[in-house]
Amino acid sequence: MTFRTPTGGSIDRNTLLRFTFDGRAYTGHPGDTLASALLAHGVHEIGRSVKLGRPRGVVAAGSEDPTSLVQVETPFSEPMLLATTVELYDGLEARGLSGQGRLSTEPDPARYDAKHEHCDVLVVGAGPAGLVAALTAARSGARVVLADEQNRAGGALLGVDEYLDDRPSAEWVADVVAELKSTPGVLVLERTTAFGMYQDGFVLALQKRTDHLGFAAPATAARQRVWRIRTRRTVLATGAHERPVVFAGNDRPGIMLASSARTFLHRYGVLPGSRAVVFTTNDSAYCAAIDLAESGVDIALVVDARPEAPARLAAECAARGVEVRAGHVVTGTGGAGRVTGAHVAPLGGAPGYPDSVVCDTVLVSGGWNPVVGLFSQARGRLRYDAGLGAFVPGEELPSVAVAGAATGELDLTACARQGRNAGAAAAAAAGFPSGGQVALPVSDSRCTARSGLVLWRVPGDEATSFVDLQRDATVSDVLRATGTGLRSLEHIKRYTTIGTAHDQGKTSGMIAAGIVAEALGVELAEQRPTTFRPPFTPVSFAALAGRDRGELHDPVRVTALHPWHVARGALFEDVGQWKRPRYYPEDGEDLHAAVLRECKATRQSVGMMDGSTLGKIDVQGADAGEFLDMLYTNVMSTLKVGRIRYGVMCGLDGMVMDDGTVIRVAEQRYVVTTTTGNAAKVLDWMEEWLQTEWPHLDVHCTSVTEHWATIPLVGPRSRDVLAAVAPGLDVSNEAFEFMTWRDTAVAGVPARVCRISFSGELAYEINVTAWHGIAVWEALMAAGEEYGITPYGTETMHVLRAEKGYPIIGQETDATVTPQDLGMAWAVSKKKADFIGKRSFARAENNRPDRKQLVGLLPVDPSVLLPEGSQVVETDRVPQPPVRMLGHVTSSYPSAALGRTFALALVRSGRERIGETVYVPVEDSLVPVTVTESVLYDKEGARRDG
Amino acid sequence: MQLIPCPWCGPREEAEFHYGGQAHVAYPEDPSALTDEEWARYLFFRDNPSGPFAERWSHSAGCRRWFNAVRDTRTHDLLAVYRVGEPMPEVTP
Amino acid sequence: MSSSAQPPGAHLPEHPDFLWDDTEPKASYDVVVVGGGGHGLATAYYLAKVHGITNVAVLEKGWLAGGNMARNTTIIRSNYLWDESSGIYEHSLKLWEGLEDDLGYPVLFDQRGVLNLAHSLQDVRDGVRRVNANRLNGIDAEWLDPAGVEEICPIVNTSPDVRHPVLGATYQPRAGIAKHDHVAWGYARAAHAMGVDLVQDCEVTGLETAGGRISAVRTSRGRILAGKVALCAAGHSSVLAKMAGLRLPLASHPLQALVSELLEPVHPTVVMSNAVHVYVSQAHKGELVMGAGIDSYNGYGQRGSFHVIEQQMSAALELFPVFARAHLLRTWAGIVDVSPDASPIVGLTPVAGLYLNCGWGTGGFKATPGVGHCFAHTVANDEPHPFNAPFTLERFTTGALVDEHGAAAVAH
């Protein structure tokens, strides 16, 4: 049996769409939602309730529906969508849910993106008020964005057959939209839900761009887009949601909001059933009764809770053979699945048996709730309107206006007037004077929703009187909550879980508040409504992540030499955002084999690495020396031009923050290097001090990290290699001393060569502009070939420096380590009056004798490699926890040069313990290790000069 | 996301900025003359009012300049911005 | 762990039929606890239960447990690096393990374990270091390689080809989640049953001292004499302390969190990632619960900035591609009071009879039983319990910080 009307509705009846629901095949038309297509086939049972497993149907026609949850399986599985908001497409497969969806384990193939939009006036909602607001603002010349969640403009007009100014309302809507779309600077966004109101006119909206196309969606188009709208003024024309009345057995499929039934009729050409009872507290449901009666639905009865039915509407009903029973309510329903009958009795009347009316549909209207979620998100205060029985905007906000049914106004012309006023005011506030009055439409509607009775629930079986149909929360639950002593709505919401489901209480929240107020015997006006939180409707994680996935989640930085490393088969390590070669395996080598080879080659002959990721900051100005004296623990102002000094930087707390070399390029110019990970942090640090504390200093800082390709050339034969490629440079030890630099040409390219060493070996750091990096690198490889020059990665660098006891910031340090702890008191000036961190060195904690100090550890068994991160303990037996820990292993390697393993560690009173045996728990054993000084290789520094 | 009026660039998205905590906490003239308590106060103790708060921001993804702002920490509304070295303006929250 | 055979939520135990009576404040109390969140309620509970001090009021300016307690992601773990931290958090975890029986309330403590992922070689070193320290401190901890991570949580993307590959993880099997309302209400109900007054809608507007000693609390519901005052006001600690002339090393920041709709069980544990900036679990009823870093600025507005949520989503999908079509259902923000070393301040103050419990930043929930127990001891005896003794205000002067940024910088 079909419930599709022979004509009418905004559907394309000439086109058939095939879909399946719960495995059964159905058809529908373009313009349908999944819900309307199912209802057209008489399918009302969509899923089961989350706790009790009771059947659940379709309650509302739009995004406020609490129950029609489905899992859409094609073209890609997505959980927890409302059948009422899924536009039908050919090949749609869906199944009903029991309040819980399922995530696909397949990767989501869809694209998502985000777009920024700036406007003068944002109008949310394209119903009568929103359309008039947008058009009024548009005519003023303001940049206007009109966003609406539906696939077409019209709002509440989409669900009625009213005439505006003697023509179908759709024509009026079409005219307004056409003018808007043809006005420059106006953006009309359909299928776009404004879901978040943030500060300073920042509004988030989600546009569903291709969902409705199903399999026909182009793969290259973003499926959904987050609009990040920054607007001067916002007009919220978000309308109102009809709310039900709670009664026993009110959860059966076939029980639907009256206006939603009307929407299914007029928008989709679908009848909700064959025989309906209409239960209302106000006028608006009469229109549903009349329209459905005219469309062939047998309206068994209109039950009006008010003592008297509205005479004119009652007469219209009578003219159509529809009985109206005033002062009555629906007290219960029957039916195993779908509703099969309604019990009708006088409201508050004498006890007695109710009338049972056979029906397959109960249409309910308990009045209207203005949609105030976005207003509330904007921190607008709400006020209880006792006439309406709803919370309404209770104050004017500086840049957010509310118009139309969202204010509680339900007359169309009045709504449109509010829209016009709001649109004009918003445009004027944004600097656009009025540009032509928009005529207000007048409706021929028979029904208004005013003059309603506020009725939250009909007394009856509380355990089957559902307040939140999605959470299975009943009047019993509410009364149980109020009986525990809870008074606050927030507590009761949590106790009962009302309003916490998928729909966030759009239809249930107000009713729950009303029932609670009744139970507690307090005025609703005194109750604080629960907070509306973003998003207005659910938004997929993927849409919010947008394009920031994979490589774009976090940019990858590579050096100018990167392609060479890749071609050479390097394995990389992530250091901050940088990719750094970790080692270059040859012939199936593992890490250890490769590193031993690279270390050996470098110590015995020559190796080189890519040091380009080290941060480089050009520091210039008359006061650059004075400035660096404050930042570094040692003195930089006395550094002579042409020379280089190692420096340590501390935070104000005296803890090591960074280290690196400082070269003096000219009297008023230094270039400082930072660790790879801290380059940005150090530049920020410098600029902060310069701008906020010492603006009088003449100093300017610029990051030059990416200008340079930096190549440390390391090992006893490095001088020979350099000499071969830098014929103009006197590379002798006398002419080119340690800790000096020279500008010269390397491989024909202008280069700055620094004689510094992070390995203890004779070494040169060759800096050339990044463009020439690969050419110079290759020239060095060629020149070094006869010495077996070996490219090495960060792991070998770490071993070489560790053998010399040089710490790595972030590995040997963890923001609790001072330069003194690292054995670097020599790098801390005693002469300078002050530098950052100095004062903190004098604190009590910094002078404890048992501070952790950097030492070397040699396992007694020279083949045992201590895992980095191991703890160090004092005794050869592990006592019961908590065990006193002396410190931990920061670095640990097998050493080719030492012919054994070794480690660096931070150990309490470490320097006093040199020579002692301590223990390192590894798995279930204790490894004895000897504490040594941190420098283990070439303690005399004999190799530095080659 | 707040719209922050950089005094050099004009209003820009919050994501372009870096927060710097309380403003007008000067580095001591002579830290060595301070007691440990006084030094700790400079290092760690900051006003944390619920209401107008003079604080520092850096337009780190823009002009990279530091500036000061008075912001109401209850509403997060920016009440005034001013350049480093300028006195804190009178504001009414 | 949730069973997929059951409808979601069906297995959640009901709350009891009686919780507590709303109380008018009396004129005077032996102890006034300011702040009716988890910490305040737990402190009152242990004052009554352990120390027999029942002439106690808990003053709450809104509704009980409506602040951070209502807004947190309920992660419970004790795998902190430093001895001081692991001491108090492990004490807390042990109390969690017996809390349901102790309170006679289903707090739904579910020991599903926590993974802290490592994405760089330094993360690995730090993680191994923490595991080793934890074990020596008697805390269950394991180091897992990527295959081990996948075994515990199959939906984590352990492919080496992603932007931030998972190189391993620390795992604490005894860690888990609980149900925050149940915890708070359990404490409230039990404290109330022992005679503690729970006073809601009662905002503290002033603290009075006499002769260097706390004497009374001024509130929106009148002046209340107090023998001792215990501050448990999280984000508002600075504002309250200022009423007694104290300045604290705290900054109050927005911290946002979010949930999805209900989903079939997919995520069996708790996953935290420092480098990718996200932490996520699947709560008892099936919703994904997620948080990230704090918003950068000071703020009492209980709202954050949306780009923080967007970044969080991006991070979440890096780790959990299966979350792509989950939906953000609700976001919110709390106010966290962050100290310079990311460790709490719990103890005495220069004002006699005034006690401080603050600075928990993002980590306060897990400490609820532990700090309630220790803070009650501190208040009752006027001296710190050994577990909170390291967390003095003085440490900022001496430099004896408990810096949990370095190795455990993950929020929570």
Image (cartoon, helix red, strand yellow):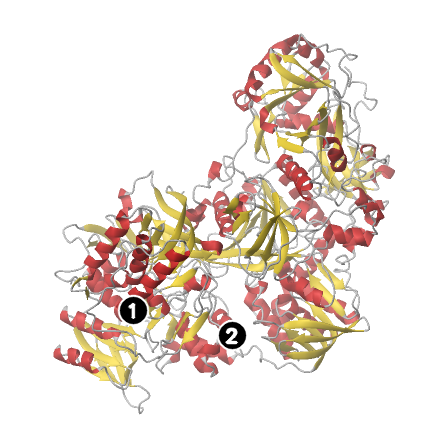
Give the residue drawn at x 21%, y 72%: A287
In the picture, measured across the screen, residue A525 lies left or right of residue A444, that is: right
Chain identifier of the residue bearing label 2 in the image: A
Q: Mark 1 — residue?
A: A414
Question: How many C-alpha atoms fall within 10 Å of the one at disc 1: few (<14), some, or many (≥20)?
Answer: some
In the picture, measured across the screen, residue C384 lies left or right of residue A199, that is: right
Cα separation between marks 1 and 2: 36 Å
Residue A772, placed above or below residue C9:
above
Residue A933 occupies quadrant: top right
The x, y position of residue C69, in whole percent, is 58, 64
Residue A518 occupies quadrant: bottom left
Say which amino acid is labelled 2.
Ser
Give A9 or A451, whichever is nearer the viewer.
A451
The x, y position of residue C281, in whole percent, is 52, 54
Chain identifier of the residue bearing label 1 in the image: A
In the picture, measured across the screen, residue C52 lies left or right of residue C76, that is: right
The x, y position of residue C122, in whole percent, is 64, 38
Residue A305, placed above or below residue A47:
below
Q: Mark 2 — residue?
A: A488
The reply to whether residue A406 is in sight is: yes
The reply to whether residue A57 is in sight is: no
Q: Residue furthest bottom?
A: A350
In the picture, measured across the screen, residue A435 lies left or right of residue C88, that is: left
Give C292 or A174, whichever is nearer the viewer.
A174
Residue A921, placed above or below residue B53:
above
The x, y position of residue C373, in whole percent, is 70, 66
Give A74 or A661, whichever is nearer the viewer.
A661
Residue C166 occupies quadrant: top right
